[in-house]
Amino acid sequence: MHILFNIFPTVHPHKRWSEASLYSRLLPVWLGLGSIALGVAIAYILVSFSPILAIIAVLAVPAGIILVSRPQRGLLLVVFAISFEELSNFGPGISILKLLSIVVFGGAVIHFLIFRRRESLVSAPQNWLLLFFIVAVLLSNFVAIDPGRTLNATGRLLRVLTLYLIVINLIRTTRALRYLLWVFVISGFISAFWGLVDPAQAGQRLYGTMGQPNNFAIAMAACLPLTLGLLNLEKGSLKRLFLVIMLAVIAYGLILSGSRGGLISALLALFLFVLTQKNKIFWVTLVGFIAVIGLLIMPAEIKQRVGLAPSPSDPEMGNSTERRETYQIFGLKLWQENPVLGVGFDGFAEAYTRSEYRFLQKNATKRVAHNTYLEILTGTGLVGFIPFIALLALSLYKTWRYAGYRKLHPDAATISAGIFAAQAAYFTGLLFGSRQYEQTLWLLIALGVVIQVLINAAARQQSPASNSPSLRPIRR
């Protein structure tokens, strides 16, 4: 464990680096100017071969310096790009988000090796549970029915988990956390707005920039309480107005997605957010107003789809429902046959194609379980399922608990309430889709660790007496 979460050796900067000298303050400027000069020199050499290579050479070095010296900025780019991964795909298994994540993670590693402060990397109970889950995924490679698929899935999961490691170790202040939440909500707002103005999505279920209505809806359900949390935190009138506009667009986009799972998750998120608030009457009124307006503007076909209005029988929807029911039946049977280690991480799809239900497949695309919990249970058995569930449960408990620490750290407690509701919404959405590789899932788990770090730091600044009233959560 020490090796996994302290992989970077402690580098104590020279004394003159730690002093607030003119030289140390201007060091990034000199590095930037030197990098630009180097980029221009490289561009001069490469321009005769390719103008594109020349432009890349000019920009790559200073961009790399920025990512190394200020990896938080690279992290914000990754968070912003989460909603646009489908649009950024330019080849099988390749996307700008994936490349950006790798570059930012590399920059963060170099930053910790060179510029790291004296504090160690963040250690939290969630890290242990995540480690146990990773070990279970690795073990499943030895029992996989399709070793190639499981090996690729393992690499994909480890790549996504780099976001978790970056977030918990780079976001150390409330200000940085607020920036990150703003970027995430703005990204969701742009995704929803894109869907509303995109002519290709007119007259059909909205999917924004995410390519699939259900994925879009679950992401928007997580954005709703985070937006409300920022609305509760920010004091400026313009900021609040912008948040209200984003809230309206996100909620309307969620409605137009026609996702039953998304709407259920959103209602749960709003309900739980209200429960964590001190002024419940105000928030009940606001959330109730949002729900009523949403119901009034919901198109008739969406009401029929989600069961709020009678609808004629739809053979296609019936076939889809029947097929998804087979996933649950087959998945439980598959787990009973392989209860301990499973059939290999991401092995459900391959097992389904070899089962008696394979005739339900209408094309060559292999069917995933459309249930993240079922994917984990069948893929890694109880060895992986138990730490995964424990990780989600602990994340929910921590954010719910810290939402009550308003006297100790008001801002962190306010944000924690929004994160708690967002986690609950997204974890509920895992019942309706296979989302173990989604960046949003691991980002929300990481945000719970960030809140824990902020609260603990505030507690250390308070009186060390354990019975101090300020260190106990406020009763709601």
Image (cartoon, rainbow, N blue to C red):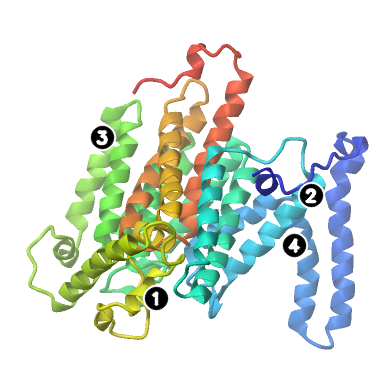
Instruction: Name the amino acid, label 1.
Output: Glu
Q: Residue at x 35, y 52 (%)?
A: 221
Residue 63's tag is 4
- Residues at marks 2 and 1 touching, judged by CB atoms closer than 8 Å: no
The secondary structure type at the circle numbered 1 is: helix
Q: Quadrant of residue 118?
A: top right
Residue 113's tag is 2
Q: Which residue is mark 1?
A: 350
The residue nearer to you, when weighing 100 against 360, is 360
- Where is residue 355? Give x, y as percent: 29, 77
| Marks 3/1: CA–CA distance | 46 Å
Q: Which residue is mark 3?
A: 284
- Mark 3 or 2, which is nearer the eye? 2
Say which quadrant the C terminus sits in.
top left
* Left or right, 14 with reference to 144: right
Q: Residue at x 91, y 35 (%)?
A: 15
Numbered marks: total = 4
Q: Quadrant of residue 357?
A: bottom left
The secondary structure type at the circle numbered 4 is: helix
Mark 3 neighbour density, 10 Å: few (under 14) some (14–19) many (20 or more): some
- Residues at marks 3 and 1 touching, judged by CB atoms closer than 8 Å: no
Mark 4 neighbour density, 10 Å: few (under 14) some (14–19) many (20 or more): some
Instruction: Name the amino acid, label 3.
Output: Val
Q: Is residue 247 visible?
A: no
Mark 2 neighbour density, 10 Å: few (under 14) some (14–19) many (20 or more): some
| Marks 2/4: CA–CA distance | 18 Å
- Where is residue 137? Give x, y as percent: 51, 59
| Marks 3/4: CA–CA distance | 46 Å
- Mark 1 or 4, which is nearer the eye? 1
